[in-house]
Amino acid sequence: MIALRSIRGQILRTSLTVLIIAFGIMSLVGMLTAIDVLKQSIDESFSFFGTNTFIISGGSGKIKAGRKRSRELPFKSIQYAQAILFKERFQFPSIISINSFLTATATIKHGNQKTTPNISIHGGDDKYLNTAGYNIEWGRNFSYSEAIQGAAVCIVGHEVNQQLSRGEQNLLDRDILVQGQHMRVIGILKKGGSGFNISRDRTVIIPVGFFRQHFAKSNASFNLNVKVTRSEWIQTAIDEATAVMRGIRSLKPGDSIDFEIMRSDTFLRIINDITAYLSVGAFVIAGITLIGAVVGLINILLVAVNERTREIGIRKAIGATQFHILLQFLIEALLICQLGGGLGIVAGIGIGNALTFIVGGAFVLPFKWIIVSVVVCMITGVAAGFGPAWRASRWNPIEALRYE
């Protein structure tokens, strides 16, 4: 109570220090909460592949460079014939699908209804849904003949169905217009959710054969999704797949691979590494701000000690010990820091979770960072308050009484 009365007595200086501390904690909690939101969103967006899937692609046109003794080759697209050869030669226990990506900015039409211009179109075979983590809610998957021969059928995502089936139960067995081509809907995917501005519900999957006939250019690149029977076999499967693909591409022993193999959890590991550095940056920024708060708090307490020297003398004269005086000023410092910390935590959680409106995902309550912030505020309060508190506790009561 004495500490609270003292804080109220110097409300302006206390408020300024509380705000400094609040900004430091807000930057810490806000950035770390935003990082947690980002990680959660990415995990939800890419976890559908599971840990037993890897993708072989042409490397998206990237150019390799290096100084190794092996001959570095540029990435090349994977031709459809090469993808078929891989399926025939790769004997590892697995499910393999051939697929390709057309666009992420398509507008799909049905009657007088049309979708937003952010629909992605993929070409896939009859195994694609399994290897890509999609599930059918209504209808069915492609048959093998439909996928290879290129039947004018398609499978649509949950959101595409919602946008186009107004007034109807769903689009099943309805005709839609996909990039100028009339196609019949044979399947509707289960809701997959969205995150990191990626939605698995805004997608249309067409047979890979239809993709080749109507949309594929001469240099079109195809991907191979390989889903291994058991996740512990994943690295062995990757090694064998690399050897098979090197043979198909006629690579010499000294040549580097001119294709890319990416495990389903590779991207998540990269993101975790990046967010680790971001977390360090958040601590550095918050630390710099809190150093300013410590300096301000020390100044307030030193001024308070000088202004209340006579009060300290009176307290000692009526029985207060050095420990009581030390404790009083330490509690003042801790209260100021915790007030600032509480304000900063609330603001930081709000600012960090504002990212959910951009990347999607659920509200995150970072209990770990809340606890860290409380501990940091406690350490800051003790570090800032101990010096002035120790000085106040060492005052001689006689000299303190006649100080003024």
Image (cartoon, rainbow, N blue to C red):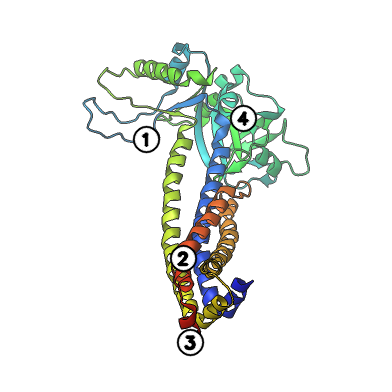
Between the residue at mark 3 and the residue at mark 1, the CA separation in whole angstroms equals 83 Å
Residue situated in front as seen by the camera: 387 or 104: 387
For residue 386, which numbered disc appears in the image? 2
Q: Which residue is mark 4?
A: 134
Between marks 1 and 4 in the image, the one whose residue lies nearer the viewer: 4
Residue situated in front as seen by the camera: 286 or 337: 337
Mark sitting earlier along the chain (2/1): 1
Between the residue at mark 2 and the residue at mark 3, the CA separation in whole angstroms equals 25 Å
Between marks 3 and 4 in the image, the one whose residue lies nearer the viewer: 3
Residue 162 in picture, x, y percent from top left: 70, 42
Q: Secondary structure at mark 1?
A: loop
Between marks 3 and 1 in the image, the one whose residue lies nearer the viewer: 3
Between the residue at mark 2 and the residue at mark 1, the CA separation in whole angstroms equals 61 Å
Residue situated in front as seen by the camera: 195 or 224: 195
Residue type, label 2 = Phe
Between marks 2 and 3 in the image, the one whose residue lies nearer the viewer: 3
Q: Residues within 10 Å of mark 2 (few under 14, many from 20)?
A: some
Residue 57 in picture, x, y percent from top left: 43, 28
Q: Can you see residue 92? A: yes
For residue 61, which numbered disc appears in the image? 1
Q: Which residue is mark 3?
A: 402
Q: Residues within 10 Å of mark 4 (few under 14, many from 20)?
A: some
Q: Is residue 280 left or right of residue 351?
A: left
Between marks 4 and 2 in the image, the one whose residue lies nearer the viewer: 2
Which residue is depicted at the point 63% across and 40% down?
193
| Viewport quadrant of the N terminus | bottom right
Residue 218 in picture, x, y percent from top left: 41, 29
Residue situated in front as seen by the camera: 109 or 129: 129
